[in-house]
Amino acid sequence: MTDLVNTWITRLCESHALGAGKLDEFGQWQLVFEQDHRCAVYLPADSPHLFFTAEICPIPDNAREAFYAALLSHNLSLLDTGGASFAIDPVDGMVWLNFGQPLISLDAASFENSLGTFLELAIRWHSRFSETVPGTEPFLGRPVENDPLFAGMRI
């Protein structure tokens, strides 16, 4: 499956002038997009699923309990997250957005569309979190109030 995913990544990189790209020895391909947003495509060994993950924001220093409760409530509301979910990385103190999809449901075009949708969603959530005053709890409403509801990843 690694060769297949590398073919999709190569096609994506060529069509969007991203330079060369492929999964590393850990099954990850990392990219930086629009204003230093970090994202990775991850194919665990022997997994039937491909995962997308993107860094969203640091965990706030104050009101953590309310922040965590809000993140969990957004995980329940799939319309807000497009089927993705938030996770906390305790090592670097960051909030990440994650999405997994069965490899069997993907081809080159659906891979590119799904990743594109995921990146758009990650940028919106990142932007919403960064609009807050430093030292205060990030706003956890919908990413952009006038956006149509996200009904899932486009494939």
Image (cartoon, rainbow, N blue to C red):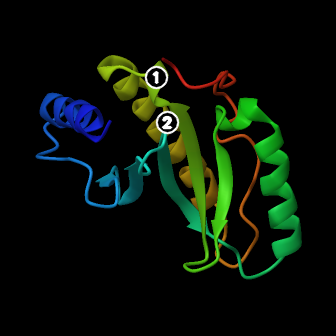
| Local crowd size for mark 1, using a 10 Å CA cut-off: few (<14), some (14–19), many (≥20) | few
The amino acid type, in three-letter code, at marker 1 is Ile
Residue in the image at 25% along x and 30% along y: 8
Q: Position of residue 103 (x, y in %)?
A: 45, 29
- The disc at residue 30 is none
Residue in the image at 61% along x and 77% along y: 93
* Nearer-the-camera pick, 89 or 125: 89
Q: Position of residue 139 (x, y in %)?
A: 74, 56
Residue in the image at 23% along x and 32% along y: 12
Name the residue beneath numbered marker 2. Answer: 48
Q: From the viewer's perspective, is 155 left or right of 81? A: left
The amino acid type, in three-letter code, at marker 2 is Pro
Question: Closer to the N terminus: mark 1 or mark 2?
Answer: 2
Q: Position of residue 100 (x, y in %)?
A: 55, 39
Q: Position of residue 28 (x, y in %)?
A: 34, 54
* Nearer-the-camera pick, 8 or 54: 8
- In the picture as drawn, the residue positioned furthest to the front comes out as 46
Name the residue beneath numbered marker 1. Answer: 104
Q: From the viewer's perspective, is 73 left or right of 83? A: right
Q: Is the residue under label 2 in contact with that under label 1 (CB below 8 Å)?
A: yes
Above-or-below relation of 89 to 123: below
* Nearer-the-camera pick, 72 or 150: 72
Above-or-below relation of 69 to 120: below
Secondary element at image label 2: loop
Residue in the image at 63% along x and 24% along y: 152
Residue 111 quadrant:
top left
Spatial CA span between label 1 and label 2: 8 Å
